Image (spheres, helix red, strand yellow):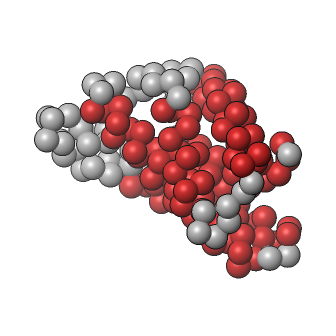
Amino acid sequence: MLGSALWFILPAYVANATPIVLGGGRPIDAGKKFADGRSIFGAGKTVQGFIAGLAAGTFVGLLQGIAAGTLSRYLALGFLLALGALLGDLLGSFIKRRLGIKRGGLAPGLDQLSFVVVALLAASPLALPSWEIVLTIIIITLPIHLATNFGGYKLGLKSKPY
């Protein structure tokens, strides 16, 4: 079950992590403010990071498709999971800004799960895993997210260890 869950959600995990390494540049919200006067997403959500994450997650889907022998299905699934993960991350940032939580601020649950939930929703027209796989994904995402963020912090890629 764990292996199936990781295999399924891997494009989303890669898409979510890639902007930390390959991001930078112009913010997606172009520095504009929302009606409440706060940033829409914040300077950490960039066009370059979004495109890099989408490409990386889709590439993982391509590799999965080659390995599984069903290229078009996995390529499409990788794209949907990557797109959903990135949109979910943007949604999480939008909510954090509305709550007055600044970039890098901690929002337990929201930080770890918004990208996974939206990724699963985005992929659902093409592939809906069993509830056991979904539950496993949700359970494993918290420790994986915390561990990878801590690793990014130790490597100097993130300013905070969470």
User: What residue lies at 42% left-to-right and 39% top-to-bottom?
Assistant: 92
Q: Is residue 19 visible?
A: no
User: What residue lies at 30% left-to-right and 27% top-to-bottom?
Assistant: 99
The answer to whether residue 92 is left or right of residue 157 is: left
Q: Where is residue 35 shown, x and y percent of the image?
A: 13, 41
The answer to whether residue 140 is left or right of residue 126 is: right
Residue 55 falls in image quadrant: bottom right
Q: Where is residue 70 shown, x and y percent of the image?
A: 80, 76
**Observer-nearest residue: 96 or 104?**
96
The answer to whether residue 141 is left or right of residue 99 is: right
Q: Is residue 17 above or below residue 144?
A: below
Q: Which quarter of the rendered picture does the C terminus lie within?
A: top right
Q: Is residue 59 above or below residue 156?
A: below
The answer to whether residue 15 is left or right of residue 38 is: right
Q: Where is residue 54 shown, x and y percent of the image?
A: 54, 60
User: What residue lies at 41% left-to-right and 23% top-to-bottom?
Assistant: 105
Q: Where is residue 80 shown, x and y percent of the image?
A: 57, 64
**Observer-nearest residue: 5 or 29?**
5
Q: Is residue 135 visible?
A: yes
Residue 103 falls in image quadrant: top left
User: What residue lies at 40% left-to-right and 45% top-to-bottom?
Assistant: 91
Q: How many marks?
A: 0
